[in-house]
Image: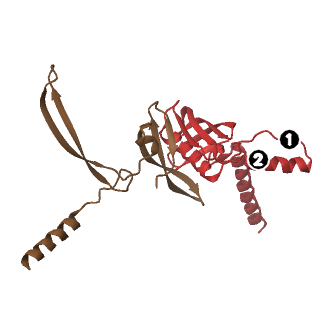
Chain colours: A red, B brown
Amino acid sequence: MFAKNLTALGKLCIILSSLLLVNCSSTKNVELNSESTFKSVEKDFNNTNHWTHTIYNAIKYNKNMLKKEDQVKQMQAVFFALNNAPEGEVVKWYNDKNQTFGLVKIVSSYPHGSGYCRILFTQISKKGKIRDFTETACKDVAYNGWQFIR
Amino acid sequence: MKKLLLILGTLTLVCTAEANAGGPWSDQYCNATTHTIITKDANGTIINQETIETMVCDDGKKDFLHYSGIAKDCREFWFDIFLNGTFVKRKGYVCQKFDGSWEIVYNPK
């Protein structure tokens, strides 16, 4: 009975340590959408812990978010560029009504495992404010979509 | 009476056979267009003139960039996005401009 319990405990230890190893083996975060599609154009905030500044920062962040229709356009630009555009070619969108625009440029591509990765430069703008991102997206043969590595 | 019936029958046929051509921005699929090819000699004398009728088909879903001559090609494209735990296909529209760059445009209605 004791030996049986010990074996079960040993098995549990092996499973737990395996899980721990898997978690530690990769420190990269994988996301399924480009940062430029959901982040605010605002990137400068008051760096204090005072509650008034926190509220001010939150208002500033939300005020400079792209509207849903513009986020969709940016997402379309990102995926069109990833799937179709060669290196150096630019994919843009404009929305005069919201005074916004975005662009995506594929900088380079390289093979990765059973697929490949593409480094993309993305830019979003709202009412004169501009924010740039540099991202890496990878596609695997065994996987339908793109994974964004952060 | 026979003549009246004949006239009525002819009118009915004419009315039902009428095609509603519509404008270029309607959802009509095909338009008949004519092109006249004029061949001239070195002195400018017309030596041959030929009119060709061609059928140009589209679904009226042309973007402003395309029909105003800013883009050479507008088309739809598909991509996969991850929604509610599964990949779903989404459609977008893009125009390639004359400088080679691409512009994402609104989905034509």
In which quadrant of the rendered image does the N terminus of chain A lie?
bottom right
Residue A46 numbered mark, or none: 1
Q: Amino acid at mark 1?
A: Asn
Vertical placement of residue A55 versus A112, above or below: below
Image x and y of residue A22, in percent: 69, 48
Image x and y of residue B15, in percent: 22, 67
Image x and y of residue B79, in percent: 50, 49
Q: Earlier in the sequence, mark 2 or mark 1?
A: 1
Q: Amino acid at mark 2?
A: Tyr
In which quadrant of the rendered image does the C terminus of chain A lie?
top right
Q: Chain of mark 2?
A: A
Q: Quadrant of residue B72?
A: top left
Q: Residue at x 69, y 46 (%)?
A: A39
- Please determine if labels 2 and 1 lie on a single subunit: yes
Q: Residue at x 60, y 52 (%)?
A: A69
Residue A92 numbered mark, or none: none
Give whichever of B98, A138 is nearer the camera: B98
Residues packed near mark 2 inside 10 Å, few (<14), some (14 to 19) or many (20 plus)? some
Marks 2/1: CA distance? 11 Å
> As drawn, which residue projects farthest toward the bottom?
B1
Q: Chain of mark 1?
A: A
Residues packed near mark 1 inside 10 Å, few (<14), some (14 to 19) or many (20 plus)? few
Q: Mark 2 — residue?
A: A61
Whether residue B86 sits left or right of residue A42 in the image: it is left
Image x and y of residue A57, in percent: 82, 46
